[in-house]
Each structure stands twice: as structure tokens, then as C-alpha cells.
Image (cartoon, rainbow, N blue to C red):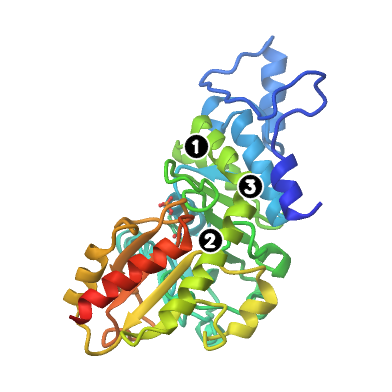
Amino acid sequence: MQLDTKLTHLGRGDDNLNVRPVNAPVMRASTILFKNHDAWQATRKARETQRVLSYGARGTCTNFELEKLLCELEGGYRAQLFPTGLASLAMVLLNYASAGAHFIITDAIYGPVRAICEKFLKNVDIQVDFIKADASDVESKIRPNTKLILCESPGSILYEIIDLPKLCEIAHTHNIPVAIDSTYSSGYLLHPIKLGVDIVVIAATKYLSGHSDVTMGAVIINEKEWKNFDKLPEIFGFTASPDDAYLVLRGIRTLGVRLREHEKSAKKIVEFLQSRKEIKTIFYPTLKTHPNHDVFIRDHLGANGMITIEFNDGISKESAIKFVDDLELFSIGASWGGYESLATVTVPPRTASDWSKRGPFVRFHIGLEDVGDLIADLARALDKILK
Ligand SMILES: *Cc1c(COP(=O)(O)O)cnc(C)c1O
């Protein structure tokens, strides 16, 4: 089955029923009832190895359908939903946390992950090294106590690209699992497990839901690293709501169509931006000038709707802010991956490389509006800052 067929046909409930709705229904539950003590105990036993209905907080059948679909998309062994993308990343770090452990994280990691390191891991004596965004210096940072490599590719804000097969080969030689934040690709544009990665994290908040009305995270894992992942929500006592799982299942059906449209419009906007003299750099991975562009093309089906620009030296941060304020069809807001266009003045949070003298940067999410309208809006707001 190709990706678009999987997105249409999988995760839709029990297809052996004679009569059924198109979509798996929302199953809301806390208590699950068992016919007798034996049935209860059998479920508890089964829960150790399978995804079975046992208690609402462990997920209901609605959650399981989404987990199955994500597993199929990524080629994983099992998947686990979490309440947010950030919680998923935190749980991955926690699952490998032990006294005296060392983690390696690439510089382009989603910014708030740094707070987990600073405010929590540091206090429990876990050391973290941030390495180059393309992970090219990973080998020199590996220590005997390195327990996990967490990366993001394409990276947040600047879309840095990692040669994943190469990174995984180095990591696995040292018996270190590799986790990736693959929210950029969202189960569609890249399949990291097929390239050797052990653990994939996706903020379903973004393209999977696609409508800016739900937060959720998912971790999809190969068999070797599955270990306790399904125990984590139980141990820490959080869950993902079946209503939210339903919304993500509803959004995910159009993931392929939406991503193709986001990319098509983004590419037209990149072309337009290239014609503007206010802009020094455009960060978009299908550009031949983008660092590691060849690796991107080799491994990805395409790019998404994210574009970041760096203004020319003569343009101040205040002008960049005015530009964003002047846009009418681009709203200001965190997150992305919905149907709507966004623009924010931003600073890439990096410590293994110095961007302090660069910028100002504006990050766009190109939505599903008419691209001509978007370009006209950008042109009008750009003309104003030069005046
Ligand atoms: C948004 C985002 C997250 C966090 O997702 P939330 O659901 O908002 O917690 C994680 N990683 C990346 C790359 C993101 O863009």
C-alpha cells in the first residue's frame, strides 16, 4: 500500500463488522468493565505485550486506531500517544535517563527541549552535549556513558539536514539508540525508521491534525527500543484524549493532499522571495543552495510549508516586526501545520553554532490560501518596510 492509500484505509476500526461507519467512533472511558475476575486478569496480562483496552488512561480503541496508523506510516513496531509533542520528547529523554548518563542532542532541536535539559536533567546529574545541527561532529562527542542521541532533521526554524543512515551507523556501532523529532515530515515526507533511526517523535499538533485545534504527540518505535514506552503514561499518569485522537484521525486523512499543496505554494513563495532585494537568505530545503540539499533530496518525498527568511543587514529587527504586523493574510502565532498562514519574527535557539550576529529572521508557515493572494500580501508589506 502506498502512503495515500494507508492514510485513507487504515486506522478505521474493525473492518470485519458487517455494518459499520466509515470512521472509528470516539470511545470515551475511564473504567472498563470485565465479565469476571479471570477476564480482568487476562487483560492485564495481555497488556504487557499488546495494545488492549484495560483502563481509559491507557488509551481507548480510538487512540489505538491512530497508533496503528502511525505505526504503519512510519514502519514502526509500536506507537504511543502523548498529550503534546513536547511531552513525547520529554518522555523519550526520561526513558533513557539514569544516574550519570550522557545525552547528545543536535543544535536544531525544538527550542523548549533545552528547558528539560537545563531545569531537570542537569539537576539529576545527566549531562547533555549539544552538537552541530547536521550531526557531523557526533563521533567526537560520544562517551562510554552516552545513552541516547536525540536529533531533529529538517531542523526547527532553519531546516538543517542530517545524513541519518550515517548518523545511525555511528551511533549503533557504539550501541546508542537514535531518536528523531520528525514533526517537519510528519510520517509522510521522511521515514526515519527505514533509514535506521530507532525512535520517531511527531508533534501531531502540527500537520497530522492539520487544523490548529488539538495538541498531541506520538512516539513511534522499532521493536528493539520499545521496552517501557507503553508503561510511561501509566507510570507518570498522563494520557491522550480519545476526542483528540479522533480529531487527529480526521485530520490525517488529508495529510498527503495538504502537504503537497503546502509545498506547491511554498515553492512559489520562495521564487517570489528570491526576487526581493530586502532578503539575504532563504531557508528552504529544496533550494540547491540549502546546506545538505543532496541528502534532503535523497531521503525526502518533498518539503512542507515552512520557509524562513533572513533580511538584509540594512533591515532592523523593528522593521521585520513592522513587516509581520503589516501582513493581513499571515497571522502571528506559535505552532504551525494548520491550514492557515503564519509569520513570526524569530531567533533560532542554537548553542553549538553562533547566529547572534545574523538576522533578523522571519519564519512563515504557508497555508492553503490562494498563493497569489499570499504573494500580493507579502509584496505589499515588503514594499512598506523600504519606505
Ligand atoms: C511544535 C513542535 C513540538 C511540540 O509540539 P507541542 O504539541 O506543541 O508540544 C515539537 N517538535 C517540533 C519540531 C515542533 O515544531
Amino acid on which disc 3 is placed: Ala
Total numbered labels placed on residues in the image: 3
Q: Give the image quarter of residue 127.
A: bottom left
Secondary structure under badge 3?
strand
Give the secondary structure at mark 1. Answer: loop
- Find residue 262 and name its label: 2
Marks 2,3: beta carbons within 8 A: no
At 50% from the left and 64% from the top, the residue drawn is 305
Q: Quadrant of ligand 1?
A: bottom left
Q: CA distance from mark 1 to mark 2?
A: 28 Å
Camera sees residue 105: no
Q: Which residue type does callout 1 highlight? A: Ala
Question: Which residue is labeled 1 in the image?
Answer: 240
Q: CA distance from mark 2 to mark 3?
A: 26 Å
Q: Is residue 21 left or right of residue 316?
A: right
| Amino acid type at mark 2 | His
Q: Which residue is mark 3?
A: 79
Q: Is residue 147 visible?
A: yes
In front: label 2 or label 3? 2
Q: Earlier in the sequence, mark 1 or mark 2?
A: 1
